[in-house]
Every structure is written in structure tokens, then in C-alpha cells.
């Protein structure tokens, strides 16, 4: 007698795992307790982003025990957003929840996020009004979103991040995008689907520590800006126009001094000024072009390799 095919999940919960081995079991239990009263079939996709605390062994164990828990192991540390992207590729639900694994994104808020989704609302973003983070982390996060907003000419709400519920249509659109820098919040924003904010309670971090430093946040903002914005190029154009105007003034001033008899060596001032100003513009332009060429090269790289662990059917 052929084996029956298990029903497809209605809800998928995707969570990248890094440095939080001790809270994975608690995460799975709390997600189950939050979703089961809704009466829908769900799955949990845990993505090990080469966690340094050997989280994969725990994920593999949970996937053997629970049929609805699936584990994905990246070949190396690709970063949080690449891990989210790998999890989205594996997610099978019609509604997808993305959340961090450290339990600061509280699983108990998932039903409220799912409740908001309907034919008109495709995205429900969790708004963490009262963040339970250190002053440094909150300040770094605000600085990151301000820098990102300035570079991309957009407004970003620092109370939101990855935690939210998304329709299948949104996730399929995100997965179809070819960008190699998979900054999930920005990709979701670019889909253009209607989004609403849902105020949630932010939990305290009980295990591990954040993998982001201020330097990493600045680098992430710069990478995102180079991938999704032409503002650096426009800034160079504006700088070139400004320097051209400044050079013209210097030339006029040099001519005036020469006619007034104040310059003994004709052309010395203007030549030095022209070389310095034009050279700086050329170097700046070459530097920005080099950055964009580097981004184009990175986009030719392959997507992260991963393996999947899940319990076999019986």
C-alpha cells in the first residue's frame, strides 16, 4: 500500500541560528504552543549559519524527533540575511513567519501577526516599541537605519527588523529577485505590497549575544547602499560640479593676480590648483566605479550551499 503524502504546512516559521544553541529547544516548544491553538498545520525551518557553538547537532536532533522541524546547515557563515534566504527557499507554507532564534522575537506574538494577513494586507511587521536591548545596541541600530535611509533616500523604522509574517506572494517575489546582497527588510519593502505595523512585546536576550558590531552594521549599510542605490554615483557627480566651479574661480583669481603683476611665475598657481583638484575628482570617481565593479563581481557568485535535515517518512 503506497504511503500517504503528508499535508503541506499552512504556516512556515523560518529562523536563522547563530550562537543560540541553548535556546533552540525552547524556541521550538514556544512556537508549537503559540501556533497549535490556531488549528493549522505548521513547520519550523531552522537555518544553522555555521554557528560557533555547534548548534547543528541540536537542530539535527530536533528534526529527528519532530516531523515538522526541518534543519538547514550552511557550508560556512554567510550572514543572517543569507541564512534567512536559504530558509525561505525551503519554506512550504502559504504564510511565512521570519524571526530571530534568541527569543527576543517572542513566539507568542506570532498569532497576532498571522491574524493581520488577508487579501489586502500581505505583510505584517512586528514593531518593537520598547526594545529590551543595551543602550549601545539600540544606538547602533538607530545609527544603522539612519545611515541606510540617507544612502538609499528612504525612511526606515528602527523598531522593525526581520520579525514579521508574510504571504506566499511576498516571499515568492523576494526569492525571484537576483540581488546577491539579500538584505531581507529592504527586499520586502521593494515588493510594494501593503504592510502594516503590529506592536509587539520585545523579550530579553537570555542566551548568547548579538553577532552584529557597530563596524559590521556600517559595513552592511554600505553594502546595501551600493547594491540598491546610485546615490554614491550622484554624490560624485555633484562633487565634480562643485570642484569644477571651485577650479574656475581659482583660475579667474590666478588670472587677476597675473594681470595685477602679483605672480612672477605665470601659470604656476593655476597649474598646481588644477592638478590637485582634477586629480582628486578622478581618484574619487575611480574609487566609486571600483566599488560598483566589485558589487557586479559579487553578484556572479553562487548562492550559499546547504544541506537539509528532516525526519524521514515512515
Image (cartoon, helix red, strand yellow):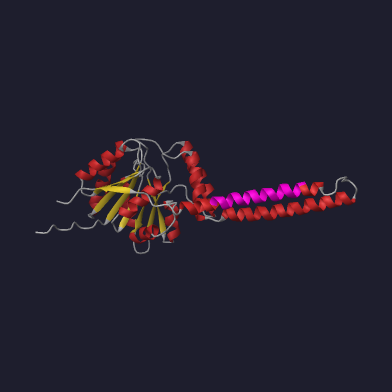
Splitting the image into 4 quarters, where does residue 48 fall? Answer: top left
Residue 142 visible at all: no
**What residue is shown at x 35% (from left), y 56% (from top)?**
166
- Percent coordinates x, y for residue 33 in the rendering: 24, 46
Direction left: furthest residue: 1
Q: Is residue 25 above or below residue 5?
A: above
- Percent coordinates x, y for residue 284 in the rendering: 63, 49
As drawn, is 45 to the left or to the right of 135? left
In the foreground, 184 or 121: 184
**What residue is shown at x 23% (from left), y 48% (from top)?**
310
Any magenta on residue 225? no
In the foreground, 201 or 139: 139
- Percent coordinates x, y for residue 182 in the rendering: 42, 52
As drawn, is 238 to the left or to the right of 305? right
Splitting the image into 4 quarters, where does residue 130 fall? Answer: top left
As drawn, is 259 to the left or to the right of 9? right
In the foreground, 83 or 305: 305
Q: Is residue 163 above or below residue 172?
A: above
Residue 197 visible at all: yes
* Magenta stretch prevailing secondary structure: helix
Quadrant that contains the N terminus: bottom left
- Percent coordinates x, y for residue 291 in the rendering: 54, 50
**Which contiguous range is marked in magenta?**
272-291
Amino acid at each position: 500500500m503506497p504511503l500517504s503524502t503528508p499535508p503541506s504546512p499552512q504556516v512556515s516559521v523560518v529562523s536563522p541560528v547563530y550562537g543560540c544553541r541553548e535556546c533552540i529547544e525552547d524556541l521550538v516548544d514556544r512556537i508549537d504552543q503559540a501556533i497549535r491553538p490556531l488549528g493549522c498545520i505548521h513547520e519550523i525551518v531552522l537555518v544553522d549559519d555555521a554557528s560557533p557553538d555547534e548548534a547543528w547537532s541540536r537542530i539535527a536532533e530536533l528534526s529527528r524527533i519532530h516531523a515538522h522541524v526541518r534543519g538547514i546547515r550552511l557550508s560556512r557563515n554567510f550572514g543572517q540575511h543569507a541564512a534567512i534566504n536559504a530558509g525561505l527557499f525551503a519554506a512550504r507554507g502559504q504564510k511565512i513567519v521570519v524571526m530571530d532564534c534568541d527569543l527576543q522575537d517572542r513566539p507568542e506574538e506570532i498569532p497576532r501577526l498571522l491574524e493581520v494577513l488577508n487579501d489586502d494586507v500581505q505583510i505584517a511587521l512586528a514593531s518593537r516599541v520598547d526594545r529590551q536591548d543595551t543602550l549601545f545596541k539600540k544606538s547602533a541600530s538607530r545609527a544603522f537605519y539612519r545611515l541606510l535611509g540617507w544612502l538609499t533616500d528612504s525612511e526606515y523604522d528602527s523598531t522593525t527588523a526581520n520579525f514579521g509574517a508574510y504571504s506566499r506572494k511576498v516571499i515568492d517575489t523576494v526569492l525571484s529577485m537576483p540581488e546577491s546582497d539579500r538584505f531581507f527588510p529592504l527586499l520586502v519593502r521593494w515588493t510594494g505590497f501593503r504592510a502594516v505595523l503590529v506592536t509587539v512585546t520585545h523579550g530579553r536576550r537570555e542566551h548568547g549575544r548579538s553577532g552584529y558590531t557597530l563596524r559590521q552594521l556600517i559595513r552592511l549599510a554600505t553594502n546595501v547602499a551600493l547594491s540598491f542605490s546610485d546615490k554614491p554615483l550622484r554624490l560624485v557627480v555633484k562633487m565634480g560640479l562643485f570642484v569644477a566651479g571651485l577650479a574656475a574661480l581659482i583660475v579667474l583669481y590666478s588670472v587677476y593676480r597675473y594681470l595685477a603683476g602679483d605672480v612672477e611665475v605665470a601659470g604656476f598657481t593655476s597649474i598646481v590648483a588644477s592638478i590637485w583638484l582634477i586629480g582628486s575628482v578622478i581618484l574619487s570617481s575611480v574609487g566609486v566605479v571600483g566599488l560598483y565593479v566589485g558589487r557586479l563581481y559579487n553578484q556572479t557568485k553562487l548562492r550559499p550551499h546547504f544541506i537539509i535535515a528532516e525526519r524521514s517518512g515512515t
